[in-house]
Image (cartoon, rainbow, N blue to C red):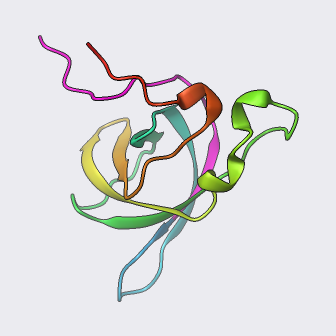
Amino acid sequence: MKERRRFERFKINLPVRLETITSDKKKVLDLETRDISVSGTFINALRSFPEGTRFILDFTVPSDDIKEFKYVKSLRGSTGTMVRSTKNGMAVHFDRDCYIMSLEPRKMH
């Protein structure tokens, strides 16, 4: 099967606060990522949302001393859309690319 991803994914478990962007009652969940890339993340979750659900994502970085997270501001208040879900979680595509030193955009071959 041909790889469809444009950017490499990194297996990083980061705490993330996920807030729905809807006109209905706001839902906030504290979850954890399974992996992350420049363009999106997969979030471990037992609950799912309809495809197309919009979110505000606030990632918690474990330490300011970790050089890979030099540009941590790009991880606060990110927005994205749920593009698919599985029984283990959901994939969220960021509205704008997330640039972190170790996540510099490297295209997949």
Q: Which residue lies furthest to the right in this view?
A: 65
- Whether 13 is among the magenta residues is yes
Q: Viewer-proximal residue, 106 or 85? A: 106
x then y, percent, for residue 18: 52, 61
Image quadrant where one finds the N terminus: top left
Q: In which quarter of the image is residue 48?
A: bottom left
Q: Viewer-proximal residue, 31 or 12? A: 12
Residue found 70% across the figure and 29% down from its top: 68
Residue found 19% across the figure and 25% down from its top: 4
Residue found 29% across the figure and 65% down from its top: 53
x then y, percent, for residue 64: 85, 41
Give the magenta part as a residue range: 1-18
Image quadrant where one finds the C terminus: top left
Residue found 69% across the figure and 45% down from its top: 71
Q: In which quarter of the image is residue 85?
A: top left
User: In the rendered picture of this protein, how many numbered marks are placed on residues?
Assistant: 0
Q: In this view, does 20 lie to the left or right of 60?
A: left
Q: Is residue 107 left or right of residue 41?
A: left
